[in-house]
Amino acid sequence: MVRTPLTPSERRRGERFGALLREARGDRSMVEVAAAAGLSAETLRKIETGRAPTPAFFTVAALAGALEISLDELAAVCARETAHEDPEAVPA
């Protein structure tokens, strides 16, 4: 399967998402949070650094649970920042 290349906006959104996760993680180690979410530390590292800018829904849901962040909050932050960057990219 061939993946469509990500747009610059999608890449920036992934970087913002990673930064949000790092902030929410606070003093907790990457290993601790990854284990709580059922992920490898390397997967979390890739997401936090933007190297994996479009993680799967269940990965995002697991991280949200481990970090006690609501999916609604994550979606609102991503949608708001995407709308600010590109008004035509607002989800319907």
Image (cartoon, helix red, strand yellow):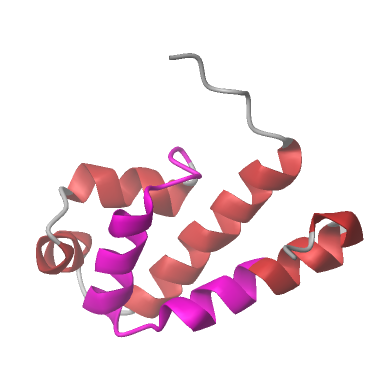
Extreme residue toward the right, this view: 87
In this view, the residue in front, 7 or 31, is 7
Asked which quadrant contains residue 61, the reply is bottom left
Q: Is 20 above or below relative to 44? A: below
> Is residue 63 shown in magenta?
yes
Q: Is residue 35 left or right of residue 73?
A: left
Q: Is 47 above or below relative to 52? A: below
Residue appearing at x 37%, y 56% in the figure: 57
In this view, the residue in front, 57 or 84, is 57
Extreme residue toward the top, this view: 2
What secondary structure do most residues of the magenta stretch adopt?
A: helix
Q: Is 70 above or below relative to 31? A: below
Q: Is residue 48 left or right of residue 66?
A: right
> Where in the figure is residue 54, as x and y percent of width and height?
48, 45
Q: Is 66 above or below relative to 16? A: below
* Magenta highlight range: 51-78
Residue appearing at x 22%, y 75% in the figure: 66
Residue appearing at x 64%, y 32% in the figure: 6
In this view, the residue in front, 69 or 51, is 69
Q: Is residue 51 left or right of residue 35?
A: right
Asked which quadrant contains residue 59, the reply is bottom left
> Where in the figure is residue 41, as x and y percent of width and height?
19, 50
- Number of dots carrying numbers: 0
Q: Is residue 69 left or right of residue 81?
A: left
Quadrant of the image for the C terminus?
bottom right
> Is residue 43 shown in magenta?
no
Quadrant of the image for the N terminus?
top left
> Where in the figure is residue 85, as x and y percent of width and height?
84, 59
